[in-house]
Amino acid sequence: MITVDKLSKRYGTTTVVDQASMVIERNSITVIVGTSGSGKSTLLRMINRLVEPSSGRVLIDGNDTAREPAHLLRRRIGYAIQGHGLFPHRTVAENIATVPRLLGWDQARVRARVDELLGVFQLDPAEFAGKFPHQLSGGQQQRVGVARALAAEPAVLLMDEPFGALDPIIRAKAQDDLLDIQRRFATTIVLVTHDMDEAFRLGSRVAVMSQGRVLQYDRPAALLTRPADPFVSRMTGSADRAMKLLSLTTAGEVAVPGSSNGPTVAASASLRDALSELVWRGAESAAVVDANGMPCGCLTVAAILAHGRPG
Amino acid sequence: MTQHRIDPLGALVTAVGAAALLWLPFVVLKPNRILPGDARSLIAVLPPSTTIACLACLILVALAALAMSKPPVRLAAALLGVIVVAAAISTAGDVLTPPGNRVVRVAPGSGFWVLLVAVGLMATDAITRLRPRPAARVLMLALFAAVTLFALAHGTFDHLSVMREYAVNAGRFAHEVRQHVWLALGSLGTAVIVALPLGILCHRVPRLRGGVLGTLNVIQTIPAIALFGILMAPLGALAAAVPLAAQLGIRGIGAAPAVVALFLYSLLPVVANTVAGLKRVSPAAVEAARGMGMTSWQVLTGVELSLALPTILTGIRIVLVQNIGLVTVAALIGGGGLGVFVFQGIGQTAIDLVLLGAIPTVALAFSAAVLLDAVVETMNRARQ
Ligand SMILES: Nc1ncnc2c1ncn2[C@@H]1O[C@H](COP(=O)(O)OP(=O)(O)O)[C@@H](O)[C@H]1O
Ligand SMILES: [Mg+2]
């Protein structure tokens, strides 16, 4: 658990982050979203002390991060940034091995970890370990960047617009991969983005920032149904807010016992996708099936619509 | 096909070479080391059979230069050309020197030098077309140097005027070469020790950059002679005031002002290239390095300087080649080095003595350039 306690950063007379407070749950993805210049990166960088706070504290599992030398703190916290920041003069394997080497892991352990991570990120070690970053595609570079951030098995991973440089299809894949990675390694991830869709897709909690202040820190659904500030409504967008809300719930969560002779919908599909399918087919209800294709309930248009409004 | 097309560089080399052979003196026969002599063409000097063999070989070289497109063939032809021209001048020396006469001088004439440049140009062009790896280039240089030194040691050119001067100055020559290299490397070494931190500082503190680079730029524009003059007074005063300084060899004239001047000249290229190299380092890589917990020192050495190294080495290469040339001027203020022969030669109007200083200087500078270029390229290849 990370406690951000009245954290502020001032440069001269301008306050870039103003009394930000939030409690970041362990083993989850927390997203900080806001317009450009709102102070997201500064807030994130105060967590690993790349930026020293002007006032306020950061506690990780109750320990004040200011009590430890900054470089030792950072070795325990993963850090991935936009444009990956890979070292161009080092191979993929050497890049990934950076923090384990700093921590003095023995060679065999480093090697095993590099191979494991390359496997996790669908990069064949035999092919990729010896390559240089410039020999990789943009998506591969980004994956190596995240693999490098995870190399020393950090409990916390900070990501600053990690998918900002990717085109939409590769970005969607990278987002799915990140959700898998989070579950696999049970990492506490704090991710910064200016893209509200990305925030909704990844975040179990989302902090909306504007002009250095955290306006609202809540579950995505609550940002839609109970916005704390007009700016939050503007960020989330009011035109398709019902659809956004539907996209936050899966068919499996809403399905009720029963059967339907309408189209089949996967339990993992969002209500938004389920509704789209029903509208397309002109059906009133759908049969929900689990990952093995076994029927596990039914879902009606009325039940879907009930989830698309506040309250 | 390209085989039937005339190679433009080959045409130039052939035309220049033929003109040199026809109209320029291949050797100059001088009654002694100072008086002007009479010009002789290659045909007039060499025995008829040797002349025919020599011309036949050169025609072969010209044909290869004009019509052959394969770089290895062109290189082989160019090397044949170099050997033929060298053999011709060596023979000319032997033929023209009366037995036992140590006063008459056989000097290579302008025709010889132009021919040598022509075949040399063809050789470098062929090597460029071959695109050898850096290690191969260094190997070629080493082979060429070894063959040349072997020929020199064997007395192949002993009857030529420059080697006559060498024979007279043999004892000093080795000493002056060492002094030359020491002055060039010593000033470079001190400059790097100062310029590297200065460049890093200029990179970190952009406000300093304009002032520092501007000042170094001004120093760079001061002519070497003037800079020696400027340094003589304070160094002389220092030696007079501080006996220890004098004991250490610091004086108004001699090696001290030379080293200081070369040091000052060396600063700008190294500082400027350090700044440029560091500027090119991806900010994201530095940010990531810090974010992963590298210490400032680890970021500087492991990321920033590592990535800037090829650019910094390019600056060092510029300085080394520049210094090897400039050290020559240091002889004027008693700094020693190969310039000693150049200025003595000028004083005595003995061109042969000038060449004894100038040719090794050019050879040193050329070798340094090839060596450091190879190092820089190896580095760039390793990281692409
Ligand atoms: N080192 C700094 N000195 C002065 N101002 C800064 C510095 N770093 C960031 N800022 C300012 O703080 C504001 C927030 O920056 P940042 O946290 O990078 O925003 P975001 O990541 O949300 O785009 C910006 O207006 C930026 O200009
Ligand atoms: Mg930012």
Image (cartoon, coloured by chain):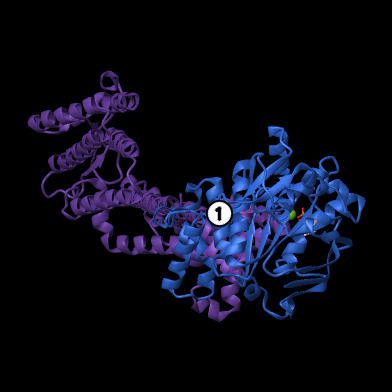
Chain colours: A blue, B purple
Where is B100 relative to B242, above or below? Answer: above
Q: Name the quadrant containing residue A187.
A: bottom right
Q: Is residue B307 visible?
A: yes
Judge by depth and name the residue closer to the eye, B80 or B245.
B80
Q: Chain of mark 1?
A: A
Judge by depth and name the residue closer to the eye, B360 or B345.
B360
**Residue at the image position 18 percent from the left and 47 percent from the top:** B159
Quadrant where the N terminus of chain A is found in the figure: bottom right
> On the rendered structure, is B213 left or right of B263?
right
Helix, strand or loop at disc 1? Answer: helix
**Residue at the image position 10 percent from the left and 33 percent from the top:** B50
Residue B200 in the image: state x and y as whole percent.
62, 62
Q: Residue furthest left?
A: B49
Judge by depth and name the residue closer to the eye, A3 or B213.
A3
Quadrant where the C terminus of chain A is found in the figure: bottom right
Q: Residues within 10 Å of mark 1 (few under 14, many from 20)?
A: many
Q: Name the quadrant containing residue B86.
A: top left
Residue A157 in the image: state x and y as whole percent.
65, 65
> On the rendered structure, is A198 left or right of B196?
right
Q: Is residue A83 visible?
A: no
Judge by depth and name the residue closer to the eye, B138 or B227.
B138
Identify residue for label 1: A143
Residue A68 in the image: state x and y as whole percent.
68, 79
Amino acid on which the number 1 mark rests in the picture: Arg
